Amino acid sequence: MLHVTGIDLNPDSREEHLPGYTPNFPHIASLVQGARYFGGKASWHWHESVELFYVRKGAILYRTPHCEHVMRAGSGGMVNSNVLHSTQILKPEADLELVLHLFSPALVAGVPGGTVEEQYVRPLVQDKEKELILLDPADAAQTETLTMLRKTFDLDETAYGYELRLQAALSEIWAHLAAQAHPRPGTEEKAATAAQKKLKQMMVYVNAHYAEKITVPMLAAAAYCSERECYRAFQSCLHTSPTDYIRTVRLQSACKMLLETDRTVTDIAQSCGFGTSSYFGMQLHAETGCTPTEYRAKWQNVDT
């Protein structure tokens, strides 16, 4: 199981990069210990794979453009394919333990264009109203699904037949989720809203140019929209401003460099668009209560 401490983005698409995720078996299992995420959160991102998660410990807030839910220990759910989402742990330090599967729907679809894909997989994936499907332990009908999900993380990844057992378990869980979501047969794929399409273009621009000066007019131009549309897209979908999003991306990139390299604080500040080490230090302290040196000392050698 992969231990993760932050979000990495692919240089081309700017979707989340999933280490170890291959076409031969498009799946990875991850353990998230929230305290090591910058600010205890994973910022807005998306991926083609679906995200099936289970909260072992603590509590976490999941957000999508149209809903948000606090998920506590014993609960779980699924984030649908290509859905923008972010997470925030509710308590500091090592209070969160989250395990998740990231996998292509093709893993459970079987034959392309076949019965399983057409009747059970595609309708759910293409139902854009199903951004986030929740599994609540207080709901007796969902207890069995949660139990199956929890047990998938106990499978021995080194054992012969692991892939077959995991594929079978994910297929069974998918059947439960599809029945719960109950998408209408023959649901046509809905295009993403214009706002979300433009927003993704602007997110790509920020993640490609965060080391440089970025203004709202530049962001708007990247998505061929007005400044007003730019502000509206960030607020309606991400519940934040363009300026705050840029600041968060810069801080997350800087924190990753602090933990994974020996580069100086001044070098990191300049590489992440803060200009000076003092301004970087002020922004990081406001967010985490630590100076760059304190942040590096606290987390760089923590065993995940």
Image: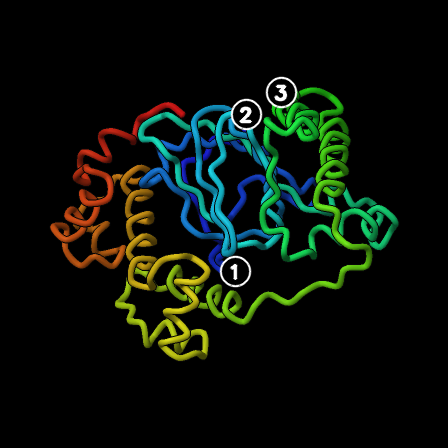
Please report the residue visible at 59 percent of the width from the left and 27 percent of the height from the top: 138
Task: Locate residue 251, reporting x and y percent.
Answer: 28, 49
In terms of depth relative to the viewer, which is nearer, 62 or 103?
A: 62
Task: Determine the residue located farthest toward the left in the rendered image.
Answer: 278
For residue 154, the mark is 3
Please report the residue visible at 74 percent of the width from the left and 51 percent of the height from the top: 183
Q: Which residue is mark 1?
A: 13
Quadrant showing the C terminus: top left
For residue 206, the mark is none
In terms of depth relative to the viewer, which is nearer, 38 or 24?
A: 38
Q: Mark 3 or 2 closer to N-term? A: 2
Q: Mark 3 or 1 closer to N-term? A: 1
Q: Amino acid at mark 2?
A: Gly
Q: Secondary structure at mark 2?
A: loop
Q: In the rendered view, tell whether residue 44 sits above or below residue 189.
A: above
Q: Secondary structure at mark 3?
A: loop
Around disc 2, counting alpha carbons within 10 Å, would you say few (fewer than 14), some (14 to 19), or many (20 or more)? Answer: some
Q: In the rendered view, tell whether residue 292 sits above or below residue 247.
A: above
Q: Which residue is mark 2?
A: 74
Q: Are marks 1 and 2 in contact (CB under 8 Å)?
A: no
Q: Nearer the viewer, mark 3 or mark 1?
A: 3
Determine whether, in the image, residue 18 is placed left or right of residue 94. right
Label 3 – label 1 distance at C-alpha: 33 Å
Q: Amino acid at mark 3?
A: Asp
Q: Amino acid at mark 1?
A: Ser
Label 3 – label 2 distance at C-alpha: 15 Å
